Amino acid sequence: MKNKYSFLILSLLVVQFSFAQSDLAKGWHLQDLKKDSVYGISLADAYLFLQQKNLKPVTVTVAVIDSGIDTTQEDLKNVLWTNPKEINGNGKDEDHNGYIDDVHGWNFLGNANRENLAKSPDEKIRIYHAYKDSFLKKEWKDTASMSFKQKFLYKTWMRAAKKLDIKPEDYTNYEVLEASIKELKKLNKIIIAEIDTAEYTIAYLEKHATKTKEGKEAKNQYLQYSSILGIESDEKNTTTLTELDDYIENKRKELVGKENKPEEVRANIIKDNYADINDKYYGNNDVTGPSCLHGTHVAGIIAAQRNNGIGIDGIADNARIMILRAVPEGDEYDKDIALAIIYAADNGAKVINMSFGKEYSPEKYWVDSAIRYAQKKDVLIIHSAGNDAENLDTIESYPSAYSEFYKNKASNIIVVGASSSNNYGNGSVIADFSNYSKNNVDILAPGVRIYSTLSPTNQYGNLNGTSMAAPIVSGVAALIRSYFPKLNYAQVKEAILKSVTYTDSTVTNLKPGNPDMKVNLLDMCVTGGVVNAAKAVENAYNISANLKGIKKQNAQ
């Protein structure tokens, strides 16, 4: 899973960024364009329509494949999926699925001693060293003798090896970034002394005066850096600096990636036979894991308990969250993702949210096979497009709907880009960090300043990213599958993709990564618009009514 600064931090290399004239309200993503003047999803109108039609929901299971979820979070603990066939804590496998005490899901990043893998090496460095000895041999130069899978792996390895050929400007950029982060830490140290607190948010800093001229200058510079990086007003300085340290450390490892073999963290902790997809009964039931902030935020967007007077309201009122921990800090492993998808499909999930991605997928066949297995089980998968302001028609990004092995595109995937609103940021509805594609991104959904559940200790806050946009679509999918349970994944997908809100003529959409270029949203995603829950449930209702009419006609 990429660091959230992977696109925005590049702006430290330029002089200025232009930022918002106004703020976005908490929960703006649920609001309505006509009533609230923001490009939200019109959720209240969706529920009003369902109420007017006197429709009753059934419970639907949504699997969240992510970093883990805080099972004690006050707004999530009552909406977690519970395995009806498993007794918690007795060390037995009552349902005989191979996973002991899998009460709320499974953690594929641990071992039976409840030790957990927190951070994984960069995938391209893993690939390079894993296959270096094989692919540098003379006999591997002749690709004609390779099987299709071997050719795919060889091309992946060659791409990784080329990416690890470091150019002089890469060192220069690293040095600039390192110097910028050091400067930010220096400013932070001055500010702490001036305002007498070791932890503060941007909002807190803006409201508190400093004691000296040096303090005032440090404050102003820190706020400027924060604006450039797109740091949320409620993010703590300690969080920002920790994540920046992680980012620069990953960049440092990339610079020496060809020389330094990464640590065998998986072999040391998980101890599975990674090369064997059938060696699958590893891990543990610690679905929270060591770092669950991302997954907790994603889960809240989908299904945080509604109308309970605390926290936030999720989108789907009868969803249950199945927790599948398979995304460490760093790049996820293909095997864990494939097995998590299969677990979700086998245990009744009807929607899977996948808010992660990477540039390399050496065991892509496993993931492709799992996606098609889920398709046969009538499971709809929602995947985030990524946050690099790149065109997915021209770059490699995984998981992907298209399979080189099956020679087709999986029909049970919706790929989601991030939207903002016309009265925030640069006024463009497509977010400036979002990946885009005329063919490989299906729809946009709000992904800027999305307010949701956090961990630890029942916190709430804003995060940005297509990671936040995908669960909004997952929430809408869960809502439809709950109120229209007879619709299959293809019909739910149709209802969503034909529901979009288009931007009006007053909105100038700007190309992500190139704010000087105006674009048509039909060139940014297949549908050319933002998901609309109200229209989606109406579409689902009409599809359902048509099906009933056809059945009635056939019965006569």
Image: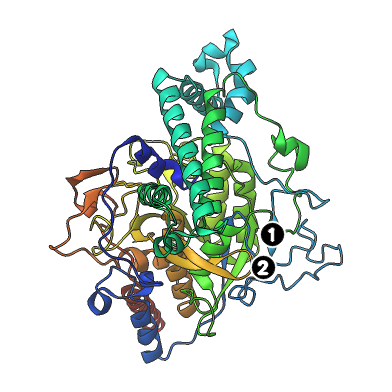
The picture quadrant where one finds residue 395 is top left
The label on residue 71 is 2
Q: Secondary structure at mark 1?
A: loop
Query: Do labels 1 and 2 touch, CB within 8 Å?
Result: yes
Disc 2 residue type (three-letter): Thr
Within 10 Å of the Cα at label 1, are there few (<14), some (14-19), or many (20+) other Cα atoms? many
Image coords of residue 391 (percent x, y) = 32, 41
Where is 212 relative to 424, above or below? above
The picture quadrant where one finds residue 15 is top left
Q: For this rendering, which residue is in front, 56 or 491?
A: 56
Name the residue at the left extreme. 505
Q: Quadrant of the C terminus?
A: bottom left
Within 10 Å of the Cα at label 2, are there few (<14), some (14-19), or many (20+) other Cα atoms? many
Disc 1 residue type (three-letter): Val
Q: Residue at position x 63%, y 39% from top?
A: 120
The picture quadrant where one finds residue 132 is top right
Q: Residue at position x 68%, y 53% from top?
A: 290
The label on residue 47 is none
Q: Which residue is mark 1?
A: 287
Where is 273 relative to 106, above or below? above
Q: For this rendering, which residue is in front, 463 or 301?
A: 463
Q: Secondary structure at mark 2?
A: loop
How many numbered circles are shown? 2
Image coords of residue 83 (percent x, y) = 71, 70
Residue 402 seen in this snapshot: no
Q: Residue at position x 17%, y 56% from top?
A: 508
Q: For this rendering, which residue is in front, 19 or 502?
A: 19
Residue 139 seen in this snapshot: yes
Distance from the alpha carbon under mark 1 to that under mark 2: 8 Å
